Amino acid sequence: MPANPPPPASDDDAPELTVSVRRLCAFAAQAGDLDLRFTPAPSALEGMAGHRQVQSRRGAGYEPELSLSCSFEGLRVRGRADGFDPQALRLEEIKTCRGPVESIKPNQRALHRAQARVYAAMLCEARQLPSLRVAVVYFDLATESETLLEEEFDAATLREQFQAMARIYLQWARAQAQRGRNLKQALGTLPFPRPAFRAGQRELSRRIYQAGAARRCLLAQAPTGIGKTLASLYPLLKAKAGHRIDRVFFLTAKTPGRTVALEALRELQDKGAHDLRVLEIEARESACRHPEAACHGESCPLARGFYDRLPAAREAASAVRLLDRARLARIAGEHQLCPYFLAQEMAHWCDVVVADYNYYFHPSAFLYVLAQEEQWQAALLVDEAHNLLERARGMYSAVLPESSFARARGMVPAAAVRALQLLRLQWDRAEASCGPDALLDQLPEELDSAIRDASGCLAEHFNAHPQLAKGPLQDLFFEILQCARLAESFDTHSVLDFSPAPDGTRQIALRNLIPATFLRPRFAAARSAVCFSGTLSPFEFYRDTLGLPPDTAMVDIASPFSARQLQVKLARNLSTRLQDRPQTLAQLVRLIATQFAQRPGNYLAFFSSFEYMEMAADELGRRHPGIATWRQTRGGAPGERAAFLERFQPGGHGIGFAVLGGVFGEGVDLPGDRLVGAFVATLGLPQHDALNERMRQRMDERFGDGYAYTYLYPGIRKVVQAGGRVIRSESDEGVLWLLDQRFARPEVARLLPAWWELAAERA
């Protein structure tokens, strides 16, 4: 803050606040239980079509989509009423649904009534009407029938109810608006919180500020160790002061990334951004305090009366500058609320939200939906963005295991038995029609129809029986529902895959190969997006596959490290190809042992698979039993991962064996002599199987270099990430062995960091 900040604005000279009818009612009129029992909600397109159908049934003079607004004590409320019948003097709020009105949750029905009354109050004021009939019209898409719930109010009563809600909202919103003005002033003069920028930090910050100010996307490759997180958050917050950036979403692939971001934001708060409000959103599964209960008031005590206790909890949470998961859990516990859904409420009122990729890029992403509803200008910071490609493929894929049918046997309602039988039949027919590669490029129409029918039958069952507990039948339903949703957009970016599951059981998968189609509108909806990582080379690969716009800016920040710190050695006559491994295993082990003898210390050795890793570790143990070794375990639990890293003690001597691309290939910080070297015994190329070959074809059709996009670029990225474990600061020194002669090829060598100087040696 400046030394002499101006006095806070009074209510009279404060700028007018604006709120939508939807948000006003959600804030001031919602009451009762949190209830997340499944109800089959119509899609946005179905909802719009339902609205039009109801409106078309009305008589002459009916006014659809009526824009309304009014002001009260400095608050402007705006919205669009669904319809007004001047002959009947009836204001209508239309809601599409599936099934009987009784299945709509009580808190939702109360919210719908509140919205209709607010629109009615605004219409009475606009047209000087003495009274009005107020109706919520529920339109059942399945039966095309209407249920009209109507009340009649005089204008004075409607005005009193509206003003009561407006006063509740105003008290809160004025405080938030004043905090926003204070924050804008503080950010305008906010200094960089460190005594000086590190090498590369200033350039990275400058380019990110430019992207935020110019509404552009940016791909930024910057080496580990320069402080990318702080260098990305600082400039966007500075840009927030001078340009319209309503929210900053810092999106990460893993929990450690969230931790680093929160530490940087706390540092910025302490250095002057005192009014900055930060929220961490953790996964629902880890935030849940009653995992055995369903999310509704009849089952979970934290859902019972949720909206009644929410205002006090919201007030308490707003007084905390940094709402990490621990602080949020404490406040939620004090007010007996679900911490996960308290976090969702606080996302409306925080300047920076730190969350997993899923919360913006998933098909049902909360932050994306919220930003669209609130019409925010949101800036994205995508941390370790090289991970987004594979994560997004998973988000836009759906898997239906045959075992799910077996687990749900005996639970299927009679009305859904035939639909599930037909789904199994069409599954068998589609699988029989595909070739030996177990893939289909098209989704058969009969299978598509069977998936939708099965989803619909189960949806009707759960809608009619909302009290049913979670279990195998609900799991089966959600898997089929996900398939049905992705089937709607099935195209050349995906493939139908009948390959067996890892355990050998049957499954069907709608598998996404190129997520650009789905991610493109997410990036387009943001004011700006910065994707940054230590490995984003080549930029065009990530721009194309992630769906970033053609004019995306690109910056490659020079490394602060030098070739003298890292000896990069190439085994020029060693092959780690699958067919050569038995013959070259002794040669590989001899090289590792020789390096260890020349410079004893802690090393990491990376291999392409667990089988190859175990083969090499066993051979080293037989030939050199005096060298201490430890190994990554398959599907290692957090405790096993911690134990693996604990072996890398200062002054220690031994070799940790790991799989390239696994949990120890990136995000691992072993500075000083905790790690003195690494061996990479593979190019990291993905397996040449039917699915990857189909991906290569699709990549080639769309981008023109299918082999590089499918195999080479993803493989070398993992190599560079693994090699980056050795040098973590300007004082570190170490050695990196690239154990394959193919690293000498020009098309491979050019993808390695410029500061690595390869020295070819005989293995």
Image (spheres, rainbow, N blue to C red):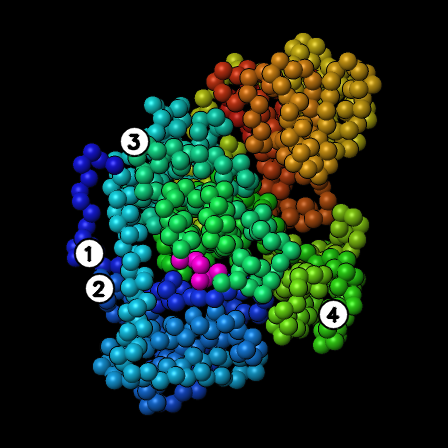
Q: Nearer the viewer, residue 293 or 692?
A: 293
Q: CA distance from mark 2 to mark 4?
A: 56 Å
Asked which secondary structure carries label 2, the reply is loop
- Point out which mark residue 11 bears: 1
Say what amino acid the circle numbered 4 marks: Val
Extreme-top residue of the structure: 598
| Spot occupied by residue 758 in the image (x, y as percentages of width and height) | 58, 19
Q: Is residue 309 magenta?
A: yes
Q: Amino acid at mark 3?
A: Pro
Q: Which mark is residue 73?
A: 2
- The residue identified by callout 3 is 191
Locate residue 752 relative to residue 273 in the image: left or right.
right
Element carrying mark 4: loop
Q: Residues within 10 Å of mark 2 (few under 14, many from 20)?
A: few
The x and y percentages for residue 108 are: 47, 70
Q: Which residues are magenta?
A: 306-311
Q: Give the Cα distance between marks 3 and 2.
A: 37 Å
The reply to whether dot 4 and dot 3 touch (C-beta < 8 Å) is no
Q: What residue is drawn where x is 30% and y is 68%? A: 164
Q: CA distance from mark 4 to mark 3?
A: 63 Å
